[in-house]
Amino acid sequence: ARAFSHVKLKAVGHALQVGKPPSDGEWFFVGILVNKGDNKRTRTGGSMVRWTLSDLSYERHEVCLLLFGDAQQNQSFAARPGEVVAVLNPKVMPARAGFQEASALSVDTRQQVVRVGTSSDFAFCTEETARNRPCQQWVNKRLGECCDAHAARKLKRMHAGESKAPQRSAAARPSQSG
């Protein structure tokens, strides 16, 4: 049996910032699929899909996973946002101008991506965009039902409503001298 080191998604993200793997040996991490891109053609004629995986933490740790070859064909059509996946020994791909802004991870065999289950904490924001479409930002249901942007907007409206509330004049206030 092979021994794998478990690396937290936050540590994977930090390792990607310097463009190297978080472990020297065989390793894996677990994340929740929060965004699944469309299938795209590669320069070599193959296809790939981009996933964004998160730990659903308050800090919103995310990593980009590019699926190529057998991994893309096997996983990309059935996987849905909210699924928990384990990723085994992904390769680190350095950032490339015009393609990806930061380092990413890549897999090319179906054995490298194992679907584990579905997160009960994952959801999409319950608010609508300015164009009356559902917001596509993910949220952790334990932390709230709307994304940070919509929560900030709600808070701003609430504070604006409080400042517009009628104030009682000094003459209308009860006397404290009694």
Image (spheres, rainbow, N blue to C red):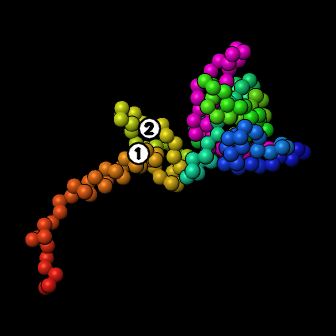
Q: Position of residue 139 (x, y in %)?
A: 51, 46
In the image, taking residue 57 as reference, residue 108 lies left or right, namely right
Q: Quarter of the image containing the C terminus?
A: bottom left
In the image, taking residue 69 as reference, residue 126 lies left or right, namely left
The amino acid on which the numbered mark 2 sits, given as a three-letter code, is: Cys
Q: Is residue 69 above or below residue 116?
A: above
Farthest top residue in view = 45
**Helix, strand or loop: magenta stretch:** strand
Q: Which mark is residue 135?
A: 2
Alpha carbons under labels 2 and 1: distance apart: 9 Å
Q: Is residue 44 visible?
A: yes
Residue occupying image coordinates x 41% and y 45%? 150
Q: Position of residue 36 (x, y in %)?
A: 59, 32
Farthest right residue in view = 1
Q: In the rendered structure, which segment of residues is drawn in magenta?
A: 27-54
Q: Secondary structure at mark 2?
A: loop
Residue occupying image coordinates x 74% and y 48%? 7
Residue occupying image coordinates x 71% and y 31%? 94
Q: Secondary structure at mark 1?
A: helix
Of residues 1 and 159, the one nearer the viewer is 159
Residue occupying image coordinates x 51% and y 54%? 143
Whether tag 2 and tag 1 are in contact, CB under 8 A, the answer is yes
Q: Which mark is residue 150?
A: 1
Q: Position of residue 131 (x, y in %)?
A: 36, 32
**Mark toward the start of the polypeptide (2 vs 1):** 2
Q: Residues within 10 Å of mark 1 (few under 14, many from 20)?
A: some
Q: Residues within 10 Å of mark 2 (few under 14, many from 20)?
A: some
Residue 40 is a magenta residue: yes
Residue 50 is a magenta residue: yes
